[in-house]
Amino acid sequence: MAAVVGHCINIESELGVPTVPLIISQFHDPVQQNHVIQKGMPALRVTYLISPVWGKTREQIRKDIVGKSPISGKMVMQDIVENLTRPLTAEEKKSGSREQSAGPERFTDTPDNLQKFFMDNRMTDYMPIILPTEEKVHEMLKGTSHRADEMVGKMAAHTQMVGIEVFPHWSYTVKTVAINAVMAGMKPDYFPVLLAVASTGKEALSVSDNSFTEMLVINGPVRKEIGLNVGLGAMGPFSQANSTIGRAWSLLSLNAGNCGRVGTTYMGTVGNPMNWNNIIIGENEEDSPWLPFHVRNGFKPNDNVVSLFEGWGIISAKNSKYSAWTKEMDFPGIIKNIFYDQDLLFGATAVLSPIVAKFVKEAGYDTVERFTEFIMTPAEAQKPYFRSPRDIQIIVTGGSNNNYYSYGGMRYNRSVLIDKWR
Amino acid sequence: MKWRIGVCLITVLCLGLFCGFPTRDNQAQAQAKAAAEKITVLSPMGKPPALQIKPLAPRLDTLDGKTVYLVNDGYLSTDILLDEMQTWFKANMPNVNTVYRLKAGQGFTAEDPKLWAEIKEKADAVVMGMGH
Protein backbone atom coordinates (compact mmCIF):
# COMPACT_ATOMS: atom_id res chain seq x y z
CA MET A 1 0.00 0.00 0.00
CA ALA A 2 2.98 2.23 0.54
CA ALA A 3 3.62 2.32 -3.21
CA VAL A 4 0.10 3.52 -4.07
CA VAL A 5 0.30 6.16 -1.34
CA GLY A 6 3.70 7.28 -2.63
CA HIS A 7 2.57 7.54 -6.27
CA CYS A 8 -0.58 9.47 -5.31
CA ILE A 9 1.37 11.93 -3.15
CA ASN A 10 3.79 12.54 -6.02
CA ILE A 11 0.90 13.08 -8.46
CA GLU A 12 -0.75 15.53 -6.05
CA SER A 13 2.41 17.48 -5.21
CA GLU A 14 4.32 17.34 -8.47
CA LEU A 15 1.57 17.23 -11.10
CA GLY A 16 -1.06 19.20 -9.17
CA VAL A 17 -3.73 16.59 -9.94
CA PRO A 18 -6.10 15.45 -7.14
CA THR A 19 -5.97 11.75 -6.38
CA VAL A 20 -7.68 9.07 -4.36
CA PRO A 21 -5.56 6.07 -3.41
CA LEU A 22 -7.58 2.90 -2.90
CA ILE A 23 -6.35 0.86 0.05
CA ILE A 24 -7.89 -2.16 1.74
CA SER A 25 -9.23 -1.29 5.19
CA GLN A 26 -6.85 -3.74 6.88
CA PHE A 27 -4.06 -1.23 6.28
CA HIS A 28 -5.80 1.86 7.65
CA ASP A 29 -3.55 2.17 10.72
CA PRO A 30 -0.15 1.86 9.04
CA VAL A 31 -1.24 4.20 6.25
CA GLN A 32 -2.63 6.88 8.57
CA GLN A 33 -0.04 6.54 11.32
CA ASN A 34 3.00 6.14 9.12
CA HIS A 35 2.90 6.20 5.33
CA VAL A 36 1.09 9.47 4.67
CA ILE A 37 3.12 11.20 7.38
CA GLN A 38 6.48 9.85 6.26
CA LYS A 39 5.72 10.80 2.66
CA GLY A 40 4.90 14.35 3.77
CA MET A 41 1.16 14.49 3.13
CA PRO A 42 -0.56 13.61 6.42
CA ALA A 43 -3.91 14.83 5.08
CA LEU A 44 -3.93 12.67 1.93
CA ARG A 45 -7.50 11.54 1.25
CA VAL A 46 -7.65 7.76 1.08
CA THR A 47 -10.68 5.62 0.26
CA TYR A 48 -10.55 2.37 2.20
CA LEU A 49 -12.01 -0.75 0.61
CA ILE A 50 -13.61 -3.77 2.20
CA SER A 51 -10.71 -6.23 2.49
CA PRO A 52 -9.66 -8.37 0.81
CA VAL A 53 -10.27 -7.55 -2.86
CA TRP A 54 -7.91 -10.12 -4.37
CA GLY A 55 -9.64 -13.49 -4.52
CA LYS A 56 -13.20 -12.15 -4.71
CA THR A 57 -15.48 -12.70 -7.70
CA ARG A 58 -16.41 -9.82 -9.99
CA GLU A 59 -19.92 -9.91 -8.54
CA GLN A 60 -18.59 -9.58 -4.98
CA ILE A 61 -16.35 -6.67 -5.98
CA ARG A 62 -19.28 -4.97 -7.76
CA LYS A 63 -21.32 -5.31 -4.58
CA ASP A 64 -18.46 -4.06 -2.38
CA ILE A 65 -17.93 -0.78 -4.28
CA VAL A 66 -21.53 0.23 -3.64
CA GLY A 67 -21.26 -1.04 -0.06
CA LYS A 68 -20.03 1.04 2.87
CA SER A 69 -16.33 1.75 3.28
CA PRO A 70 -15.37 0.23 6.67
CA ILE A 71 -13.57 3.45 7.61
CA SER A 72 -15.70 6.37 6.38
CA GLY A 73 -19.00 4.52 6.59
CA LYS A 74 -19.95 6.02 3.22
CA MET A 75 -20.63 4.14 0.03
CA VAL A 76 -17.19 3.46 -1.53
CA MET A 77 -17.95 5.22 -4.84
CA GLN A 78 -19.49 8.18 -3.03
CA ASP A 79 -16.37 8.36 -0.82
CA ILE A 80 -14.18 8.54 -3.94
CA VAL A 81 -16.27 11.31 -5.52
CA GLU A 82 -16.27 13.33 -2.31
CA ASN A 83 -12.53 12.92 -1.82
CA LEU A 84 -12.00 14.47 -5.27
CA THR A 85 -14.50 17.32 -4.92
CA ARG A 86 -14.80 18.35 -1.25
CA PRO A 87 -13.02 21.72 -0.76
CA LEU A 88 -9.67 21.58 1.00
CA THR A 89 -9.46 22.46 4.66
CA ALA A 90 -6.77 24.73 6.09
CA GLU A 91 -4.98 21.65 7.43
CA GLU A 92 -4.92 20.07 3.97
CA LYS A 93 -3.34 23.22 2.49
CA LYS A 94 -0.47 23.29 4.99
CA SER A 95 3.15 23.06 3.91
CA GLY A 96 6.55 23.41 5.58
CA SER A 97 9.31 21.44 7.24
CA ARG A 98 8.98 19.34 10.37
CA GLU A 99 11.92 17.90 12.31
CA GLN A 100 11.61 14.29 13.47
CA SER A 101 13.26 12.73 16.47
CA ALA A 102 14.06 9.11 17.24
CA GLY A 103 14.00 9.88 20.97
CA PRO A 104 16.63 10.68 23.61
CA GLU A 105 20.29 9.80 23.12
CA ARG A 106 20.64 8.19 26.55
CA PHE A 107 18.52 6.21 28.97
CA THR A 108 19.18 5.78 32.71
CA ASP A 109 17.68 3.03 34.86
CA THR A 110 18.55 -0.28 36.50
CA PRO A 111 19.92 -3.00 34.18
CA ASP A 112 16.74 -5.08 34.48
CA ASN A 113 14.53 -2.10 33.74
CA LEU A 114 16.67 -1.12 30.78
CA GLN A 115 16.44 -4.63 29.31
CA LYS A 116 12.67 -4.36 29.60
CA PHE A 117 12.66 -0.80 28.23
CA PHE A 118 14.63 -1.80 25.13
CA MET A 119 12.28 -4.72 24.57
CA ASP A 120 9.07 -2.79 25.19
CA ASN A 121 10.21 -0.07 22.81
CA ARG A 122 11.06 -2.65 20.15
CA MET A 123 14.76 -1.85 20.05
CA THR A 124 15.66 -5.56 20.28
CA ASP A 125 14.82 -8.87 18.64
CA TYR A 126 13.19 -9.91 21.95
CA MET A 127 16.36 -11.72 22.99
CA PRO A 128 18.36 -10.25 25.89
CA ILE A 129 20.96 -7.74 24.78
CA ILE A 130 24.28 -6.49 26.09
CA LEU A 131 23.37 -3.07 27.46
CA PRO A 132 25.26 -0.44 25.44
CA THR A 133 26.99 1.59 28.13
CA GLU A 134 29.41 4.32 27.11
CA GLU A 135 32.33 2.08 28.22
CA LYS A 136 31.26 -0.90 26.12
CA VAL A 137 30.60 1.28 23.08
CA HIS A 138 34.02 2.89 23.57
CA GLU A 139 35.59 -0.59 23.53
CA MET A 140 33.69 -1.48 20.33
CA LEU A 141 34.93 1.71 18.67
CA LYS A 142 38.50 0.47 19.18
CA GLY A 143 37.72 -2.03 16.38
CA THR A 144 37.94 0.74 13.78
CA SER A 145 40.12 3.75 13.06
CA HIS A 146 37.10 5.72 11.86
CA ARG A 147 35.76 8.58 13.93
CA ALA A 148 32.69 7.88 16.06
CA ASP A 149 30.71 10.72 14.50
CA GLU A 150 31.53 9.76 10.91
CA MET A 151 28.44 9.13 8.82
CA VAL A 152 28.40 5.50 7.63
CA GLY A 153 25.29 5.40 5.50
CA LYS A 154 21.55 5.69 5.12
CA MET A 155 18.98 2.96 5.25
CA ALA A 156 15.29 2.50 4.50
CA ALA A 157 12.97 -0.46 4.41
CA HIS A 158 12.77 -0.79 0.68
CA THR A 159 16.16 -0.88 -0.95
CA GLN A 160 15.29 -3.99 -2.94
CA MET A 161 12.62 -2.03 -4.76
CA VAL A 162 12.95 0.29 -7.73
CA GLY A 163 11.21 3.60 -8.34
CA ILE A 164 9.73 5.89 -5.72
CA GLU A 165 11.11 6.16 -2.21
CA VAL A 166 8.46 4.44 -0.12
CA PHE A 167 10.07 5.04 3.27
CA PRO A 168 12.50 7.84 4.05
CA HIS A 169 16.14 6.97 4.64
CA TRP A 170 17.45 7.23 8.19
CA SER A 171 21.13 8.01 8.64
CA TYR A 172 23.62 6.56 11.11
CA THR A 173 27.15 7.18 12.35
CA VAL A 174 29.99 4.83 13.29
CA LYS A 175 28.89 5.23 16.91
CA THR A 176 25.30 4.17 16.16
CA VAL A 177 26.62 1.07 14.41
CA ALA A 178 28.87 0.39 17.43
CA ILE A 179 25.92 0.66 19.84
CA ASN A 180 23.98 -1.95 17.89
CA ALA A 181 27.11 -4.11 17.65
CA VAL A 182 27.47 -4.06 21.44
CA MET A 183 23.80 -4.97 21.88
CA ALA A 184 24.23 -8.00 19.61
CA GLY A 185 27.24 -9.28 21.56
CA MET A 186 29.89 -8.59 18.94
CA LYS A 187 33.61 -8.28 19.70
CA PRO A 188 35.50 -5.17 18.49
CA ASP A 189 37.45 -7.43 16.09
CA TYR A 190 34.27 -8.08 14.09
CA PHE A 191 33.27 -4.43 13.97
CA PRO A 192 34.81 -3.61 10.54
CA VAL A 193 32.70 -6.39 8.98
CA LEU A 194 29.49 -4.80 10.28
CA LEU A 195 30.63 -1.33 9.25
CA ALA A 196 31.31 -2.58 5.72
CA VAL A 197 27.79 -4.07 5.58
CA ALA A 198 26.28 -0.90 7.08
CA SER A 199 28.06 1.25 4.50
CA THR A 200 25.96 -0.35 1.75
CA GLY A 201 22.70 0.90 3.28
CA LYS A 202 21.22 -2.53 2.62
CA GLU A 203 18.61 -3.47 5.18
CA ALA A 204 18.51 -6.90 6.81
CA LEU A 205 14.76 -6.71 7.40
CA SER A 206 12.82 -6.38 4.17
CA VAL A 207 9.41 -4.69 4.10
CA SER A 208 8.10 -7.18 1.53
CA ASP A 209 5.16 -9.44 2.35
CA ASN A 210 7.34 -12.26 0.96
CA SER A 211 9.19 -12.59 4.29
CA PHE A 212 12.65 -12.31 2.78
CA THR A 213 15.97 -12.82 4.54
CA GLU A 214 19.53 -11.71 3.87
CA MET A 215 22.85 -13.50 3.66
CA LEU A 216 26.49 -12.51 4.10
CA VAL A 217 29.40 -14.41 2.61
CA ILE A 218 32.73 -13.47 4.15
CA ASN A 219 36.02 -14.15 2.39
CA GLY A 220 39.69 -13.48 3.03
CA PRO A 221 42.06 -13.81 5.99
CA VAL A 222 39.58 -11.96 8.22
CA ARG A 223 37.60 -15.20 8.58
CA LYS A 224 40.36 -16.75 10.69
CA GLU A 225 41.26 -13.52 12.44
CA ILE A 226 37.77 -13.15 13.89
CA GLY A 227 37.17 -16.86 14.44
CA LEU A 228 34.39 -17.46 11.92
CA ASN A 229 33.46 -21.11 11.82
CA VAL A 230 33.89 -22.39 8.27
CA GLY A 231 33.99 -26.07 9.21
CA LEU A 232 31.40 -28.38 10.76
CA GLY A 233 28.11 -26.58 11.27
CA ALA A 234 29.38 -23.50 9.43
CA MET A 235 25.96 -21.91 8.97
CA GLY A 236 24.88 -22.65 12.54
CA PRO A 237 25.35 -20.83 15.84
CA PHE A 238 28.70 -22.35 16.70
CA SER A 239 31.01 -19.38 17.02
CA GLN A 240 30.60 -15.93 18.46
CA ALA A 241 31.41 -14.25 15.14
CA ASN A 242 28.86 -16.33 13.20
CA SER A 243 26.23 -15.73 15.85
CA THR A 244 26.53 -12.02 16.40
CA ILE A 245 27.43 -10.31 13.11
CA GLY A 246 24.10 -11.15 11.50
CA ARG A 247 22.18 -10.29 14.65
CA ALA A 248 23.89 -6.91 14.78
CA TRP A 249 22.89 -6.27 11.15
CA SER A 250 19.24 -6.99 12.00
CA LEU A 251 19.37 -4.76 15.10
CA LEU A 252 21.02 -2.00 13.09
CA SER A 253 18.28 -2.26 10.46
CA LEU A 254 15.61 -2.14 13.13
CA ASN A 255 17.02 0.80 15.06
CA ALA A 256 19.14 2.83 12.69
CA GLY A 257 17.19 2.15 9.50
CA ASN A 258 13.65 2.12 10.93
CA CYS A 259 13.08 -1.27 9.28
CA GLY A 260 11.25 -4.24 10.78
CA ARG A 261 8.37 -2.25 12.29
CA VAL A 262 5.59 -4.80 12.03
CA GLY A 263 2.62 -3.35 10.17
CA THR A 264 4.50 -0.47 8.60
CA THR A 265 8.09 -1.18 7.57
CA TYR A 266 7.68 -4.94 7.96
CA MET A 267 4.89 -6.76 6.17
CA GLY A 268 6.23 -10.34 5.88
CA THR A 269 3.10 -12.48 5.89
CA VAL A 270 4.45 -15.50 7.71
CA GLY A 271 7.80 -14.06 8.80
CA ASN A 272 11.22 -15.68 8.52
CA PRO A 273 13.20 -17.24 11.38
CA MET A 274 16.43 -16.32 9.56
CA ASN A 275 15.72 -12.63 10.31
CA TRP A 276 17.16 -13.08 13.81
CA ASN A 277 20.66 -13.65 12.55
CA ASN A 278 20.36 -13.75 8.75
CA ILE A 279 22.56 -16.35 7.02
CA ILE A 280 26.21 -15.86 7.85
CA ILE A 281 28.74 -17.84 5.85
CA GLY A 282 32.49 -17.80 6.07
CA GLU A 283 33.55 -19.58 2.91
CA ASN A 284 35.75 -22.60 3.47
CA GLU A 285 38.38 -21.40 1.02
CA GLU A 286 41.00 -23.85 2.30
CA ASP A 287 38.95 -26.98 1.51
CA SER A 288 37.17 -25.70 -1.59
CA PRO A 289 38.35 -27.16 -4.90
CA TRP A 290 37.59 -23.87 -6.66
CA LEU A 291 38.65 -20.24 -6.44
CA PRO A 292 36.95 -18.44 -3.54
CA PHE A 293 33.77 -16.49 -4.19
CA HIS A 294 35.42 -13.06 -3.84
CA VAL A 295 38.27 -13.93 -6.21
CA ARG A 296 35.73 -15.08 -8.81
CA ASN A 297 34.18 -11.65 -8.44
CA GLY A 298 37.32 -9.67 -9.12
CA PHE A 299 38.94 -9.33 -5.68
CA LYS A 300 42.44 -10.45 -4.69
CA PRO A 301 42.83 -13.61 -2.56
CA ASN A 302 44.06 -11.59 0.43
CA ASP A 303 41.29 -9.01 0.22
CA ASN A 304 38.83 -9.19 3.08
CA VAL A 305 35.43 -9.02 1.50
CA VAL A 306 31.83 -9.32 2.62
CA SER A 307 29.22 -10.15 -0.04
CA LEU A 308 25.53 -9.47 0.40
CA PHE A 309 22.73 -11.73 -0.83
CA GLU A 310 18.95 -11.42 -0.55
CA GLY A 311 16.05 -13.78 -1.03
CA TRP A 312 13.82 -16.38 0.56
CA GLY A 313 16.34 -18.34 2.55
CA ILE A 314 18.41 -21.52 2.53
CA ILE A 315 17.18 -25.04 3.13
CA SER A 316 18.72 -28.47 3.17
CA ALA A 317 18.69 -29.85 -0.35
CA LYS A 318 18.82 -33.45 0.83
CA ASN A 319 15.73 -33.16 2.95
CA SER A 320 13.67 -30.87 0.80
CA LYS A 321 14.33 -32.19 -2.66
CA TYR A 322 15.64 -35.74 -2.59
CA SER A 323 14.12 -38.24 -0.26
CA ALA A 324 15.63 -41.28 -1.96
CA TRP A 325 19.11 -42.40 -0.98
CA THR A 326 21.19 -43.59 -3.86
CA LYS A 327 24.60 -45.14 -3.84
CA GLU A 328 25.96 -43.15 -6.75
CA MET A 329 25.03 -39.52 -6.57
CA ASP A 330 25.07 -37.46 -9.75
CA PHE A 331 25.90 -34.24 -7.93
CA PRO A 332 26.24 -31.99 -11.01
CA GLY A 333 22.88 -33.22 -12.33
CA ILE A 334 21.18 -32.97 -8.93
CA ILE A 335 22.47 -29.46 -8.32
CA LYS A 336 21.38 -28.45 -11.81
CA ASN A 337 17.90 -29.75 -11.00
CA ILE A 338 17.60 -27.78 -7.78
CA PHE A 339 18.57 -24.63 -9.60
CA TYR A 340 15.76 -25.22 -12.07
CA ASP A 341 13.36 -25.65 -9.17
CA GLN A 342 13.88 -22.02 -8.13
CA ASP A 343 11.77 -19.01 -8.93
CA LEU A 344 13.59 -16.68 -11.31
CA LEU A 345 13.10 -13.58 -9.17
CA PHE A 346 16.19 -14.34 -7.14
CA GLY A 347 17.88 -17.08 -9.11
CA ALA A 348 19.50 -19.52 -6.73
CA THR A 349 22.50 -20.11 -4.54
CA ALA A 350 23.85 -23.53 -3.63
CA VAL A 351 25.92 -23.87 -0.48
CA LEU A 352 28.02 -26.99 -0.99
CA SER A 353 30.09 -28.84 1.55
CA PRO A 354 33.70 -29.20 0.33
CA ILE A 355 33.17 -32.89 -0.31
CA VAL A 356 30.20 -32.29 -2.63
CA ALA A 357 32.13 -29.52 -4.39
CA LYS A 358 35.00 -32.00 -4.93
CA PHE A 359 32.56 -34.53 -6.41
CA VAL A 360 31.42 -31.88 -8.87
CA LYS A 361 34.98 -30.97 -9.75
CA GLU A 362 35.89 -34.61 -10.32
CA ALA A 363 32.87 -34.94 -12.59
CA GLY A 364 34.64 -32.56 -14.96
CA TYR A 365 33.88 -29.07 -13.69
CA ASP A 366 37.24 -27.74 -12.66
CA THR A 367 35.96 -24.17 -12.36
CA VAL A 368 32.71 -22.73 -11.02
CA GLU A 369 32.32 -20.92 -14.33
CA ARG A 370 32.34 -24.21 -16.22
CA PHE A 371 29.83 -25.70 -13.80
CA THR A 372 27.62 -22.59 -14.16
CA GLU A 373 27.74 -22.97 -17.93
CA PHE A 374 26.54 -26.57 -17.54
CA ILE A 375 23.65 -25.42 -15.33
CA MET A 376 22.74 -22.62 -17.74
CA THR A 377 22.60 -24.98 -20.71
CA PRO A 378 18.98 -26.05 -21.18
CA ALA A 379 17.96 -29.60 -21.95
CA GLU A 380 17.48 -30.33 -25.63
CA ALA A 381 14.54 -28.48 -27.23
CA GLN A 382 13.99 -26.41 -24.09
CA LYS A 383 14.37 -22.67 -23.68
CA PRO A 384 17.10 -21.26 -21.42
CA TYR A 385 15.79 -20.89 -17.87
CA PHE A 386 18.22 -18.45 -16.30
CA ARG A 387 18.73 -14.94 -17.63
CA SER A 388 22.40 -14.71 -16.72
CA PRO A 389 25.17 -16.67 -14.97
CA ARG A 390 24.76 -14.16 -12.12
CA ASP A 391 21.45 -15.90 -11.30
CA ILE A 392 23.47 -18.93 -10.23
CA GLN A 393 25.85 -18.75 -7.28
CA ILE A 394 27.98 -21.43 -5.65
CA ILE A 395 29.47 -21.11 -2.16
CA VAL A 396 31.59 -23.74 -0.43
CA THR A 397 31.52 -24.07 3.33
CA GLY A 398 31.18 -26.56 6.16
CA GLY A 399 32.85 -29.84 7.06
CA SER A 400 33.88 -32.74 4.88
CA ASN A 401 32.26 -35.52 6.87
CA ASN A 402 29.49 -36.24 4.37
CA ASN A 403 27.72 -35.37 1.15
CA TYR A 404 25.32 -32.69 2.31
CA TYR A 405 24.57 -29.31 0.93
CA SER A 406 21.92 -26.59 1.02
CA TYR A 407 20.34 -24.26 -1.44
CA GLY A 408 17.81 -21.49 -1.75
CA GLY A 409 16.43 -18.59 -3.74
CA MET A 410 19.15 -16.13 -2.77
CA ARG A 411 20.38 -13.45 -5.18
CA TYR A 412 23.88 -11.98 -5.08
CA ASN A 413 23.59 -8.26 -4.49
CA ARG A 414 27.08 -6.78 -4.09
CA SER A 415 30.49 -7.14 -2.37
CA VAL A 416 32.35 -4.60 -0.25
CA LEU A 417 35.88 -4.45 1.14
CA ILE A 418 36.10 -4.85 4.89
CA ASP A 419 39.58 -3.38 5.34
CA LYS A 420 38.38 0.11 4.48
CA TRP A 421 36.57 0.03 7.81
CA ARG A 422 39.42 -1.20 10.00
CA MET B 1 49.45 -29.65 74.61
CA LYS B 2 47.24 -31.61 72.27
CA TRP B 3 44.07 -30.13 73.70
CA ARG B 4 45.56 -26.63 73.25
CA ILE B 5 46.18 -27.34 69.55
CA GLY B 6 42.64 -28.66 69.28
CA VAL B 7 41.19 -25.53 70.88
CA CYS B 8 43.25 -23.37 68.52
CA LEU B 9 42.00 -25.28 65.47
CA ILE B 10 38.38 -25.02 66.58
CA THR B 11 38.85 -21.28 67.25
CA VAL B 12 40.33 -20.73 63.78
CA LEU B 13 37.50 -22.75 62.21
CA CYS B 14 34.89 -20.78 64.07
CA LEU B 15 36.49 -17.49 63.10
CA GLY B 16 36.55 -18.66 59.49
CA LEU B 17 32.90 -19.56 59.60
CA PHE B 18 31.93 -16.29 61.25
CA CYS B 19 33.99 -14.33 58.76
CA GLY B 20 32.66 -16.44 55.88
CA PHE B 21 29.01 -15.70 56.49
CA PRO B 22 29.41 -11.94 56.21
CA THR B 23 31.49 -12.44 53.02
CA ARG B 24 28.67 -14.34 51.36
CA ASP B 25 26.24 -11.76 52.62
CA ASN B 26 28.44 -9.04 51.20
CA GLN B 27 28.49 -10.72 47.80
CA ALA B 28 24.73 -11.01 47.74
CA GLN B 29 24.43 -7.43 48.90
CA ALA B 30 26.83 -6.28 46.22
CA GLN B 31 24.85 -8.12 43.56
CA ALA B 32 21.60 -6.66 44.83
CA LYS B 33 23.18 -3.23 44.91
CA ALA B 34 24.42 -3.61 41.32
CA ALA B 35 20.98 -4.73 40.18
CA ALA B 36 19.38 -1.75 41.87
CA GLU B 37 22.05 0.70 40.76
CA LYS B 38 21.09 2.84 37.84
CA ILE B 39 23.30 2.90 34.78
CA THR B 40 23.23 5.01 31.65
CA VAL B 41 23.10 3.42 28.21
CA LEU B 42 23.15 4.85 24.71
CA SER B 43 20.28 4.89 22.25
CA PRO B 44 20.77 2.63 19.22
CA MET B 45 18.47 4.69 17.03
CA GLY B 46 19.46 6.29 13.73
CA LYS B 47 18.50 9.78 12.69
CA PRO B 48 15.25 10.26 10.77
CA PRO B 49 15.18 12.98 8.11
CA ALA B 50 13.13 16.14 8.47
CA LEU B 51 9.66 15.85 6.93
CA GLN B 52 8.70 18.15 4.11
CA ILE B 53 4.95 18.68 4.46
CA LYS B 54 3.16 19.11 1.14
CA PRO B 55 -0.34 20.51 0.55
CA LEU B 56 -2.93 18.48 -1.33
CA ALA B 57 -3.65 19.44 -4.93
CA PRO B 58 -6.71 21.70 -5.38
CA ARG B 59 -9.99 19.78 -5.55
CA LEU B 60 -12.48 19.89 -8.39
CA ASP B 61 -15.83 21.71 -8.06
CA THR B 62 -17.53 18.83 -9.81
CA LEU B 63 -16.58 15.71 -11.74
CA ASP B 64 -19.08 16.54 -14.49
CA GLY B 65 -17.26 16.88 -17.79
CA LYS B 66 -13.97 15.94 -16.17
CA THR B 67 -11.54 13.13 -17.02
CA VAL B 68 -10.76 10.70 -14.21
CA TYR B 69 -7.84 8.31 -14.75
CA LEU B 70 -8.27 4.91 -13.10
CA VAL B 71 -4.71 3.68 -12.64
CA ASN B 72 -3.85 0.07 -11.88
CA ASP B 73 -0.62 -0.23 -9.89
CA GLY B 74 -0.41 -3.92 -10.74
CA TYR B 75 -1.76 -5.77 -7.72
CA LEU B 76 -3.99 -8.79 -8.19
CA SER B 77 -7.69 -8.11 -8.99
CA THR B 78 -7.14 -4.35 -9.34
CA ASP B 79 -8.10 -4.68 -13.01
CA ILE B 80 -11.52 -6.07 -12.03
CA LEU B 81 -11.96 -3.47 -9.29
CA LEU B 82 -11.23 -0.53 -11.59
CA ASP B 83 -13.29 -2.03 -14.41
CA GLU B 84 -16.27 -2.22 -12.06
CA MET B 85 -15.66 1.37 -10.95
CA GLN B 86 -15.57 2.46 -14.59
CA THR B 87 -18.88 0.68 -15.15
CA TRP B 88 -20.32 2.44 -12.09
CA PHE B 89 -19.27 5.87 -13.37
CA LYS B 90 -20.85 5.17 -16.78
CA ALA B 91 -24.11 4.12 -15.15
CA ASN B 92 -24.31 6.68 -12.36
CA MET B 93 -22.23 9.67 -13.49
CA PRO B 94 -22.30 9.47 -17.29
CA ASN B 95 -20.83 12.96 -17.67
CA VAL B 96 -17.55 11.74 -16.16
CA ASN B 97 -15.01 10.57 -18.70
CA THR B 98 -13.00 7.66 -17.27
CA VAL B 99 -9.74 6.32 -18.68
CA TYR B 100 -8.18 3.05 -17.49
CA ARG B 101 -4.40 2.69 -17.45
CA LEU B 102 -2.04 -0.02 -16.19
CA LYS B 103 1.10 1.51 -14.68
CA ALA B 104 4.22 0.23 -16.42
CA GLY B 105 7.51 -0.79 -14.81
CA GLN B 106 8.64 -3.74 -12.75
CA GLY B 107 7.01 -3.72 -9.35
CA PHE B 108 4.48 -1.52 -7.56
CA THR B 109 7.01 1.17 -6.72
CA ALA B 110 8.39 1.54 -10.23
CA GLU B 111 7.93 4.91 -11.86
CA ASP B 112 6.08 5.29 -15.17
CA PRO B 113 7.21 8.69 -16.55
CA LYS B 114 5.16 8.27 -19.73
CA LEU B 115 1.97 7.79 -17.73
CA TRP B 116 2.79 10.67 -15.38
CA ALA B 117 3.24 12.95 -18.41
CA GLU B 118 -0.08 11.77 -19.84
CA ILE B 119 -1.82 12.39 -16.50
CA LYS B 120 -0.35 15.87 -16.27
CA GLU B 121 -1.62 16.66 -19.75
CA LYS B 122 -5.00 14.95 -19.81
CA ALA B 123 -6.24 13.96 -16.34
CA ASP B 124 -8.36 16.11 -14.05
CA ALA B 125 -8.21 13.51 -11.28
CA VAL B 126 -6.65 10.09 -10.55
CA VAL B 127 -8.01 7.10 -8.69
CA MET B 128 -5.20 4.59 -8.09
CA GLY B 129 -5.40 1.07 -6.74
CA MET B 130 -4.71 -0.96 -5.04
CA GLY B 131 -2.93 -0.80 -1.75
CA HIS B 132 -3.20 -4.39 -0.70
Image (cartoon, grey):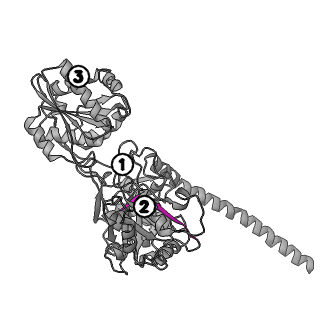
Q: Is there one chain holding both mark 3 and mark 2?
A: no
Position of residue B129 measured from the top left corner of the image (x, y, whole percent):
26, 35
Is residue B109 one of those drawn in magenta? no
Magenta stretch secondary structure, dominant: strand
- Residue B93, placed above or below residue A123: above
Judge whether B106 appears above or below A182 on screen.
above
Residue A270's tag is none
Q: Earlier in the sequence, mark 2 or mark 1?
A: 1
* Residue lying furthest front: A381
Pick the residue in front: A245 or A422.
A245
Q: x, y (%) of residue A265?
A: 35, 46
Mark 1, mark 3: which one is toward the viewer? 3
Q: Which residues are magenta?
A: A402-411
The extreme right residue here reads: B2
* Residue B74 can be seen, yes or no: yes
Q: Amino acid at mark 2?
A: Phe
Name the residue tied to disc 2: A339
Q: In the image, what residue type sits under mark 3?
A: Trp
Which residue in the protein does label 3 denote? B88
Name which residue type carries label 1: Val
Residue A186 makes an appearance in the image: no
The residue singled out by tag 1 in the image is: A207
> Do residues under tags 2 and 1 come within 8 Å of each other at their CB atoms?
no
Separation (CA) of disc 1 from disc 3: 35 Å
Q: Quadrant of residue A141?
A: bottom left
Q: Nearer the viewer, mark 2 or mark 1?
A: 2
Pointers 1 and 3 in contact (CB under 8 A)?
Answer: no
- Of labels 3 and 2, the one closer to you: 2
Answer left or right for A378 relative to B100: right
Residue B95, quarter of the rendered image: top left
Alpha carbon of mark 2 to alpha carbon of mark 1: how far?
A: 26 Å
